[in-house]
Image (spheres, rainbow, N blue to C red):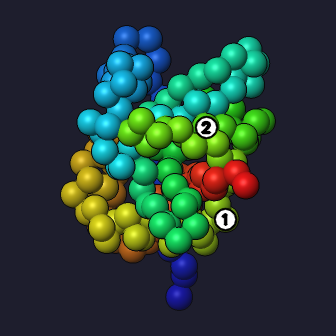
Amino acid sequence: MSEHPAPTIKVPNPPSGFKAIPWRLPIWLYRLKLGFLLGHRFLLLTHTGRVSGEPRNAVLEVIHYDAATGTHYVASGFGEKSQWYQNLIKTPEVTIQIGNRKIPVTAARLSPEEAERILRIYRQEHPKALRELSKILGYELDGTEENFLAFTRALPVIAFQRNS
């Protein structure tokens, strides 16, 4: 019996130019002190540009929050191509803002097994959000377990842990 090749997921390229504007608009909510409107499902990440050394911002969806440890988890929808993700690899000490509260944290990429676990929790708690967001980003999720596993392997999942 021959084995079927494992399904692959094509990671979309991050938007650039005018196409990036809708992705950047939520930053203005935080700048206008209205970040609380996005609730606890989103955070403002302030990170350091790996080339410029300048502060950079991105608004990211919190896919899971562990209240016991105070850890926020996010996934890079554009994989390792995301500028914010690449910046975190160089400088993992960052600040996140939830509502109007700023928290110094250290970013760490999860192992593939841990990323799968967190994304399964997200799928269980927010199935509609996962379906809609994956469509917006350009992922083709067919509902099979093999396809979901390939999806979890394509997305880096980052844990933001509070600094002591």
Q: Nearer the viewer, residue 85 or 54?
A: 54
Q: Residue furthest bottom?
A: 1
**Residue 118 shown left or right of residue 82 in the figure:** left
Q: Is residue 150 among what the camera can see?
A: no
Q: Position of residue 129 (x, y in %)?
A: 26, 53
Q: Is residue 145 above or below residue 28?
A: below
Q: Residue at x 72, y 42 (%)?
A: 92
* Residue at disc 2, secondary structure: strand
Secondary structure state at the residue bearing disc 1:
loop
Residue drawn at the location 31% of the way across and 45% of the way down: 39
Against 87, is 138 above or below? below
Q: Residues within 10 Å of mark 2 (few under 14, many from 20)?
A: many
- Total count of labels: 2
Residue 60: image location, x then y, percent: 44, 40
Image quadrant where residue 141 sits: bottom left
Q: What is the crowding at mark 1: few (fewer than 14 residues within 10 Å), some, or many (at least 20)?
A: few
Q: Amino acid at mark 2?
A: Thr
- Furthest residue in direction top, as rendered: 18
Is 142 placed above or below 75 here? Answer: below
Question: Dots 2 and 1: beta carbons under 8 Å?
Answer: no
Q: Position of residue 3 (x, y in %)?
A: 54, 79
Q: Residue at x 31, y 71 (%)?
A: 124
Please say whether residue 88 is visible from this viewpoint.
Answer: yes
Left or right of 91, for residue 4 = left
Q: Residue 111, labelled with which disc?
A: 1
Q: Nearer the viewer, mark 2 or mark 1?
A: 2
Q: Position of residue 12 (x, y in %)?
A: 46, 37
Q: Specify the amino acid type for callout 1.
A: Ser
Q: Which mark is residue 95?
A: 2
Of label 2 and label 1, which has the lower sequence position?
A: 2
Q: Quadrant of the C terminus?
A: bottom right
